[in-house]
Amino acid sequence: MTIIDLRSDTVTQPTEEMREAMARARVGDDVLGEDPTVHELEGLAAEMLGKERGLFVPSGTMANLVAVMTHTQKGDEVLVEAEAHTYYYEVGSISAVAGVIPRPIPGRLGYIAPDQVREAVRPPNVHFPIPRLLCLENTHNRAGGIPFGPQEMDAVGLTAHELGLAVHVDGARIFNAAVAVGVPAGQLVRYADSVMFCVSKGLSAPVGSVLLGKADFIERARRFRKMVGGGMRQAGVIAAAGIVALRTMVDRLATDHANARRLAEGISRTAPLSVDLSRVRTNIVLVAVNARLTAPEFTDRLKQEGVLTLPTGPSTIRMVTHRHITAHDVDMALEAIRRTATAFVQPR
């Protein structure tokens, strides 16, 4: 049976060019600052995002944690969107490890507006934690991969700075956002004090994320990376794939977006499922399942058809397109989805 894996873009495999680059990578001890391939990846990432320096880390979750630890002190308050990955999916690490207090703010489709930031920042008071950091997410995972453009990012970033907050952007899929809104990724984070992105999602590299910011920020972050176990040795063997990813895989993300749209439009015509097409702008499709069904049940039935998806709640399924999903795969998945939906609505 052919398997069509729509669970996540994290399932992508490295390209042949990446594998070749990994095999011939020049390496050194990265903890000692001696891996030339890691240096090359960090420099390339900094150039593309418009930041001074970069830091290669094993995962996006670690990148976000290290950023929070670098920006804050224990007991500080961090403003974060209520459905953000940093708050929702990272095992409470910013509290358990960084020791900060998250202040979740319900955004509009994942976006925290400037007025919401102003309302959330309380005046100095001995009873309150000190508000220190605003965390943003672009694209926003649980909102359906919605991208935020320069105007939105600039407005909230400038407001945060006016209020004395630093700004960190969880840009795990920042290049998806850049491709969707048609600007270089650096334009989306010009008022961010730090940003991270993953090379291991739609960019198809096997491992890693890069955290970026000013040189002094990255020097402090390097110590925290070591503290949480992220110091690597001959990491050039994986950094090499990240370099290829940045040089060859960004522009092709538009294909993933087109396939996601094709998938969403097909599902929108398949009762009893529904999709808010206005939210399908990158590579994530959120599918609402009729109340008579449950998302886990539907997902299990689809698996029997060879289509892998991810339930994100009792009535919501997430599907993510990526390099291994072609337009033909989308059409095959739609046939399986329609068969499964038909079976569910037939009388029992």
Image (cartoon, rainbow, N blue to C red):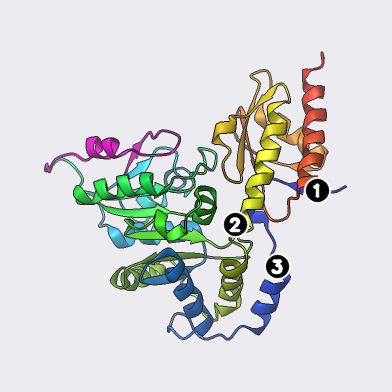
Which residue is at 44% across, 80% downward?
31
Towards the viewer: 15 or 318: 15
Q: Secondary structure at mark 3?
A: loop
Disc 3: which residue: 15
Spatial separation of the CA atoms under disc 2 and disc 3: 13 Å
Please give the label number shown on residue 37: none
Amino acid type, label 3: Thr
Comes first in the chain, label 1 or label 2: 1
Spatial separation of the CA atoms under disc 1 and disc 2: 19 Å
Q: Is residue 182 above or below residue 207?
A: above
User: Where 61 sits versus 267, above or below?
Assistant: below
The kind of residue on which mark 1 rests is: Ile
Binning the other alpha carbons within 10 Å of mark 3 as few (below 14), some (14 to 19) or many (20 upward) gives some
**95 versus 203 height, above or below:** above
Quarter of the view holding residue 260:
top right
> Left of 213 or right of it: where is 137?
right
Circle 2 SS class? loop
Q: Which residue is mark 1?
A: 3
The residue depicted at 29 percent of the width and 59 percent of the height is: 71
Amino acid at dot 2: Lys
Q: Is residue 38 left or right of residue 103?
A: right
**x and y, in percent, of residue 8 in the image:** 64, 49
Position of the C terminus, as image quadrant, is top right
Q: Which mark is residue 201?
A: 2
Q: Residue at x 35, y 70 (%)?
A: 218
Q: Position of residue 7 (x, y in %)?
A: 67, 45
- In magenta, the rendered stretch is 102-126
Q: Is 137 a magenta residue?
A: no
* Furthest residue in direction right, as rendered: 1
